[in-house]
Amino acid sequence: MGTTAHVDAAPEWQPEADLLGGLDEAPRQAAPSLRLLVDLIRKRALGLAFVGGVMLGWLAIGWWLWPVQWANSGPWDLAAPYQERYVALVAAQFYRDGDALQARRDLAGWRPEALAAVLSTMMKEAPTGEARQELAALQNALALQDAAEPPLWLALLRQTSVYWSAGLAIVLLTAALALAVVPPRWVPHLAAAEGAEGQAGPQALAAAPGRGPLEPWLEAFEEAAEEVSTAADSTEAQGEEEGEPAQQEGKPAARPVERVFLNAERPEGHPAEKEEKEETGSLLADLLAGEELLDQRLEVLSTMVEDVPVDGLARQARRVLAQLRGVELGLLGAGES
């Protein structure tokens, strides 16, 4: 930078810093709710997993592990190929002897709609004309009408993937209902946590006014400045004990920073670039708790900082302060009204 300025001590109370710091308080209030929700899910995860496991376990046990064992079942409980074979035998016997009463006894207990559907399917898939005639004769004897095409829902229920999808949907719906019902029990805890953080927020801002989101950067610079100060003190103490300067021991002495104030005349023969680096380092040292020694990291940072016109910066600062005062007066007026 081409110019530097004295850094005045900050007043004890800065309304602008309080207003800027208060802007950072709003995003923090959502943190307790999110943390409590995550803790709630973790605590209830075992119960939700148990419920989902039971629901899926019933299906697995009933379908694979211990399936239902049929005893004394009728022909309508057989698989489709065996049902068709049984009906074909009954139709062939009826076609030979013409005993309609015996045919009704053999097919007793079969639902008419299901039997008509089986006969219609078999007649469409009959390999020979004779087999088709036998089935048609049985259908006429039983007074069954041609079965219509099965509805869409019945065709969907015959698909195994539909049952898997329904089971998964039930599990997800149960989990959603559990999460919707359980959180109201934690409303007092959420309110207490938000109130505690709301009380801690102004105290933290009062302890460190004006920092806001730049606090991590300022802490890093303060730590670096403390390290430089500690290293310099140890070097000077060691040199005093041994009675010789630090340069003779092979350790470079810390270079003092030359402070250049406003409207200072440059010495003759002094390079402009070197003087600008020294001025930048001086300003950084003033900002960092008035350290007199410049660390290499701060020196590198000073070379990266671009020139800033002091006049324009002062105008911008005055404009921002005026806006903040207007906001403060508006808030005070709203509070009084």
Image: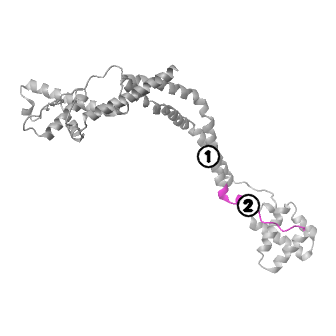
Q: Is residue 121 above or below residue 44?
A: below
- The part of the image, by quadrant, that contains residue 179 is top right
Q: Which mark is residue 96?
A: none
Residue 196 percent location from the top left of the image: 49, 24
Horizontal side, residue 308 vs residue 135: left or right: left
Crowding around mark 1 (Cα neighbors within 10 Å: few <14, some 14 to 19, many 20+) is: few
- The part of the image, by quadrant, that contains residue 9 is top left
Horizontal side, residue 264 vs residue 144: left or right: left
Residue 304 in view (yes/no): yes
- CA separation in Å, label 1 and label 2: 26 Å
Q: Which residue is mark 2?
A: 152
- Frontmost residue, 207 versus 185: 207
- The part of the image, by quadrant, that contains residue 202 is top left
Residue 44 percent location from the top left of the image: 57, 37
Horizontal side, residue 253 vs residue 158: left or right: left
- Frontmost residue, 17 versus 295: 17
- Frontmost residue, 89 versus 25: 25
- What segment is highlighted magenta in the picture? 142-162
Which residue is drawn at the image coordinates 29% and 34% (left, top)? 313
Q: Is residue 151 inside the magenta stretch?
A: yes
Q: Which residue is mark 1?
A: 172
**Disc 2 residue type (three-letter):** Leu
Indicate the secondary structure of the residue bearing disc 1. Answer: helix
Which residue is drawn at the image coordinates 48% and 22% (left, top)? 333
Which residue is drawn at the image coordinates 52% and 33% (left, top)? 33
Q: Is residue 25 above or below residue 151?
A: above
N-term-proximal mark, 1 vs 2 = 2
**Disc 1 residue type (three-letter):** Leu
